């Protein structure tokens, strides 16, 4: 019924940029907070950035490099990633509170390597 689909991942060199998108679709009557999380092999899933009306939150490791934004009319959240580092390599997952239920996308791979 309700789906979150991420896109925009890929392979990029250190210092490069990527823009991730996450679009929600289906029978949606309410979307609350939205955010991005990431997980690499052997590590726990960690918060990258979240957004709610009038507020954003970032992990210390990405502050100044990543920017989260959303387009409510399109039910879409974005993550602009600049100055990418090898340690940013991970599967990035979108999360959103949809119809008062926390939902996850299937993830998109981001690889930062020279």
Image (cartoon, rainbow, N blue to C red):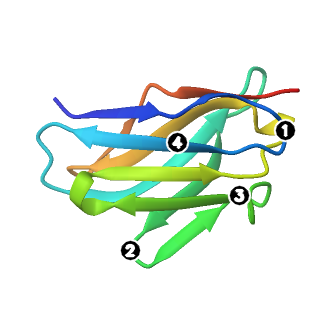
Question: Relative to residue 96, is residue 80 drawn left or right?
Answer: right
The residue identified by callout 2 is 53
Q: Earlier in the sequence, mark 2 or mark 4?
A: 4
- Mark 4 neighbour class, 10 Å CA radius: few under 14, some 14 to 19, many 20 or more: many
In this rendering, the label closer to the viewer, 4 or 3 = 4
| Image height of 76 relative to 13, above or below | below
Q: Disc 3 versus disc 1: distance between alpha carbons?
A: 19 Å
Query: How many angstroms separate mark 4 from mark 3 (CA)?
Result: 17 Å
Q: Are marks 1 and 4 in contact (CB under 8 Å)?
A: no
Against 47, residue 105 (above or below) is above
The mark nearer the N terminus, 3 or 1, is 1
Q: CA distance from mark 2 to mark 4?
A: 20 Å
Helix, strand or loop at mark 3 = loop
Q: Is residue 114 above or below residue 75?
A: above
Q: Residue at x 28, y 61 (%)?
A: 72
Label 3 to label 2: alpha-carbon separation? 18 Å
On the image, numbered disc 4 is attached to which residue? Answer: 20
Secondary structure beneath label 1: loop
Image x and y of residue 11, in percent: 70, 25
Residue where numbered disc 3 is placed:
59
In the picture, the disc for residue 14 is 1
Q: Position of residue 57 (x, y in %)?
A: 59, 66
């Amino acid at each position: 019924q309700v789906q979150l689909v991420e896109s925009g991942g890929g392979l990029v060199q250190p210092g490069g940029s990527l823009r991730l998108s996450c679009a929600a679709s289906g029978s949606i009557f309410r979307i609350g907070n939205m955010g991005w999380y990431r997980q690499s092999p052997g590590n726990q899933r960690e918060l990258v950035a979240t957004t709610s009306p009038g507020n954003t939150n970032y992990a210390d490791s990405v502050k100044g490099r990543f920017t989260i934004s959303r387009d409510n009319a399109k039910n879409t959240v974005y993550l602009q990633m600049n100055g990418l580092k090898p340690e940013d390599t991970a599967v990035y997952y979108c999360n959103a509170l949809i119809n008062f239920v926390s939902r996850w996308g299937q993830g998109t791979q981001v690889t930062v390597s020279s």
